[in-house]
Structures are given as structure tokens and as C-alpha cells.
Image (cartoon, rainbow, N blue to C red):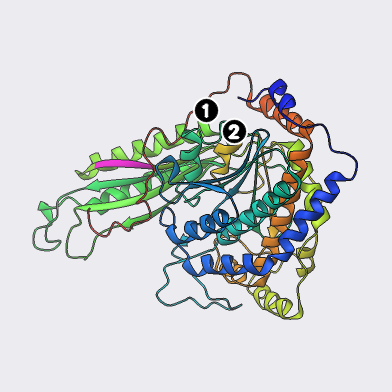
Amino acid sequence: MRTAIALLASLALLPAPGRAQDAKEMVLQHVEAHAAEYERVAMEIWDLAEVGYQEHRSSGLLQGRLAEHGFQITPGVAGIPTAFVASYGSGEPVIAILAEFDALPGINQDRTPERNPVEGKGAGHACGHHLFGTGSTAAALAVKDWMESTGQAGTLRLYGTPAEEGGAGKAYMVRAGLFDDVDVVLHWHAGDRNMADPTSSLANKSAKFRFTGISAHAAGAPERGRSALDAVEAMNHMVNMMREHVPQETRIHYVITYGGAAPNVIPDFAEVFYYVRNPDPKNVLSIFERVAQAAEGAALGTGTTMEYEVIHGIYNLLPNVALAQMVHSNLSDVGGVTYTDQERRFAEAIRTTLPENAPPLESAGQVKPFELLLGARAGGGSTDVGDVSWTVPTAGLRTATWVPGTSSHSWQAVAAGGTTIGTKGMLVAAKALATSAVELFLDPNLILQARAEFEERRGPDYEYIPLLGDRDPPLDYRNAPGARQ
């Protein structure tokens, strides 16, 4: 754990007037000068669309770029082949930037403003992580260039974090202690607006429930069979009835990942994949236990057996107002996204597929006014950045990489993310992250202020207990079950 005395002792004096502005201008120029290069990398990762824990080429692209520019790379951290830590410099402070790069299975789209799936492609960047990873890398390279040019003390790290989409890569990295000596973490995400409000998210725990029965001819000898699919359906029915009796902020959703191969064969194996979400991790744990009990009851009632595998568990985001205000200021200085005529025509076509109350296209060029949303749930999503934020003071932002009004996990997000609309938003994020990192390196008081707020919000008796327990990273969680394996 960092201490104020040690931090102050290790940091240089406050910068002379104008030094911070000169430093910010330097990193802004670096991002802009290399914009075409970063666009190529982002589009290559968009094309690859590798899913969680299978992002070998995407991760390798970012690692190679960082290594070429003088970062020391530690690959395969936390038992995850596609996770890595890239480090430059030495000593304190230690400022970190997060980078994601996994795609979502089951959705894909071409770079067109009308629905146009790509034949044979089973995944797509519907959450913009190709932009996330590349934009964060761009910011890290810009800050590294400034540090090298000026002799700035301290350590800059970029964390390559796989499998954010349901795989909780960061939670395993936190559990491995990889963030224990970090002073501040910065991150960002693709979105349909530009903002840096301090918000929270939903804690989340997931598991694959697997039922085993007895196969038989569904018409010739049904009495001999015990249907694993019946067990899945019974479990789902009980959980759906349970929705009336959980806190209203709770979200429970599932997909049947395997239910059999032929109607005339009673399936002896079936699997259902569940998510349980709530703003409070304690509620998540208690509700998850009730879901597991429903699975046990379903197995008992159908004459099958059941086992489940926890896939991930993540905390809610812990906001940090001091850091969020700083990031918002830098984002406001950078500004939003301005469309060319061609981009505007693309955006207008996309907008015809969005709800009528979608924000105007001009909002992509604006930065949302800073708003304190503490105590409020700004959205229904979850992120494994939550575990990081309970370990290190953390702040993030969103930028307009999608047409205003676009939802994440949609074909519209995939489409815009594969165009210059997406990369323009990515460059806004890279600039805001880079200038924020520079400000942290040059202002030790800001780090101390963020740490004090962080400690107060966590409370004196806080202990990190991973919601995913002691299991190893589920490197195969995106593999289709097919038949029992």
C-alpha cells in the first residue's frame, strides 16, 4: 500500500508554471502525428475480432508496437496467455493505463450503415475494444515519448487485459497482485458520447450450469430417459419466478448454450450460462446462491445431476471524484468528434435505425457537462475495471466512437467502430488519457488527493475477496460445448 510520505519523498517538486501545458501539447502532437498508424492497428484488430482469452494476434499486435518503442513487456501474466504488462521508466509515481481487445461472439457486421453481417464471421467488436486497446496504446506511446524527451521520473505501465466480456481478465490480474504498487489507473471505453462522470456499475457473477441425464429414444422408450434439457428448462422457470423476489436493481440473464442435438434423442447433457448482477457485490453473492439452489432443485425434480462452473465474478466500479474532475478537464480541452460530409452521411443512415429519441448527431462534437452521479446507477452494465478500482484509485472516460444513440453490443456499434467515426473517437480518448497521465506525473498533490478519497470510500476495514474465488482463469469459456466434453 502506498503512503503519502513515501510518495512525496519520491516525487519531484511541483512543475514550474507552463511546464504542464507544454507537456500536454507534446503528447497531443505525438498522438496526432501517428494517427494513421493507430487507425491501421485498430482496424486490423476489428478485422480479427478475437473473443475472450483467444486474442493472441490482437494482443501480439499491441505488445509488438509497445516493444518497438522501448517498453519492457511481460507476457502471459496471471496465468493468461494473452494478458501482458508493458512498462517504461522506473520509480514513483506508477501511473497505469488499461487496454482491452476482446470481441463479442454471436454478432458481426460489415462497415456499412445497414444491417449486413459478414458471412462466416462469428464475432464482432460490438463493444469497441479494438479501439480501447489501440487508443490506450497510443496514449502510452505518447506519454513515453514525453518522458524520454524530458527525463521525467516515474513508471508508466500499460496493462493488456483480455476477456473483459464475461471472462473477468482484470479480476485475475488484480488477484495476482499486478496492481499492488500502482498509484493511479486510467481507462476509457467506446461510446456514443463524450463524458468523464464518476459513476458506478453493477457487480456481476456468472456460471455455467451443467446437467447430466440419461439418453433414450424420445418416442420408443421415453420412460428410460432423464432429460438434461428438462432440468435446464425447470431451472430457468424457477429463476424467472424468483425475479419478483429480488432487489429491483438486480439483473439476471441466461442463454442455453447446449440443449441437445435431435428432438428424438432425450439429451443426456445440457448447459445454461447465467449472469447475476446487482450494484452491491454482497447482494450478487446471495442472489447467486439462490440461483444455484434452483439448479439443485431442477436436478432433483428431473432425476438428473448438476454441477456448475463459476466463470467470472467482478465488483462494481468505485468512483473517484478527484480523478474524474481532472480527466473531465482534459477531455474538455481535447473536445469531441467532428464529422466529415462522408461520415455525416454514414451517421445519418445509421440514425434511421435508432430510436426516435436518439441524441442529435451534433452531440458527438460536445463534451457532456460534469455531473456527480454518486449513489446512482448510471447504466445496467458491468466491467472488470471494478476490481481494479477497489485496488487502486481509478478514473475513466467515454468518447463518441459510435453514432449518438447507439447501444453497445449492437450491429450499429460494430459498423461505426470499423470506420473513421470510431477511430476519431479513439484519438480523442488517446489524447485525453495522455494529457491526464502527464498531469498525474507532474502533480503529486493530485495523486495524494485521489488516494485520500479512495481510502475513505473503501473504508478502514476493506479486504479484497475475489468474487470468482480461487479458480484458474477460464481460458476455454468461449468454446462452444457442442456435446459433452
Residue type, mark 1 in image: Tyr
Q: Earlier in the sequence, mark 1 or mark 2?
A: 2
Pointers 1 and 2 in contact (C-beta within 8 Å): yes
Residue ranking furthest to the right: 17
Picture residue at 64% right of the left edge, 25% below the top: 2
Quadrant in which the N terminus is drawn:
top right
Where does the image place residue 268, in percent across and percent down from the top left?
Answer: 19, 53
Residue type, mark 2 in image: Trp
- Where does label 1 land, which residue? 464
Residue 364 covered by magenta stretch: no
Write the start and end of the magenta stretch as one range.
306-310
Picture residue at 23% right of the left edge, 64% below the top: 261
Where does the image place residue 467, in percent across and percent down from the top left?
Answer: 46, 34
Is residue 280 placed above or below 429 in the rendered structure?
A: above
Closer to us: 215 or 476: 476
Residue 453 relative to residue 161: left or right: right
Quick check: can you spot residue 195? no
Is residue 45 placed above or below 384 in the rendered structure?
A: below
In the structure shown, which secondary structural element does the residue marked by tag 1 occupy? loop
Residue ranking furthest to the top: 461
